Amino acid sequence: MHEVVYNSLDVFDDVDARPSNESFLGKISTVGSVVLYGWIATTRVKVIVALSGSPTMENHEARMKALLSKIYRLSVAAMMNCFQPMDAPFNSPKLESKLNDIARHFRT
């Protein structure tokens, strides 16, 4: 799975050339039964969500856009923690917990 996500980062390089300010990239790749959706912020923060299986719900793009936007906002809030050491790897148990809650809610 790491290779699939890593290889999808090439799509983000192509985004730099486009004039749109839209952060939601939509479906960026499909590999087997895994579908990848992307989000890129003006600050170059990238969010990728990988879904396994074939989604059957209607209005899936709108739901993915809302999901990626929420993940981005949570990530920004976590990165703004003034107590996070600048020279340490980013680690936020609170963010991880919230992301797990979002994933559980999304699956239902």
Image (cartoon, rainbow, N blue to C red):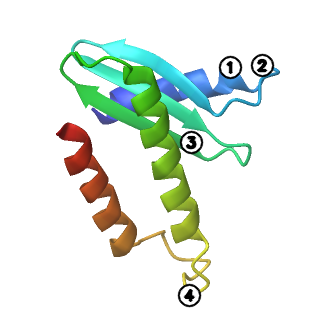
Q: Looking at the rendering, in which quadrant would you find the N terminus? A: top left
Give the camera-side residue of 101 and 30.
Answer: 101
Q: Which residue is mark 3?
A: 46
User: In terms of secondary structure, where does tag 4 sit?
Assistant: loop
* Residue placed furthest toward the bottom: 83
Q: Amino acid at mark 4?
A: Phe
User: In terms of secondary structure, where does tag 3 sit?
Assistant: strand
Give the camera-side residue of 46 and 89.
Answer: 46
Residue 14's disc is 1
Q: Amino acid at mark 3?
A: Lys
Q: Amino acid at mark 2?
A: Arg
C-alpha separation, residue under disc 4 versus residue under disc 1 = 35 Å
Q: Amino acid at mark 1?
A: Asp
Residue ID at (40%, 72%): 92
Specify whether residue 18 is in view.
yes
CB of mark 1 within 8 Å of CB of mark 2?
A: yes
Residue 28 drawn at (x, y percent)? 48, 19
Q: Which residue is mark 4?
A: 83
Residue 27's disc is none
Is 12 on the left-hand or right-hand side of 98?
Answer: right
Dot 3 crowding, Cα within 10 Å, few <14, some 14–19, many 20+: some
Of the residues under marks 3 and 1, which one precedes in the sequence? 1
Is 33 on the left-hand or right-hand side of 43?
Answer: left
Residue ID at (79%, 20%): 17
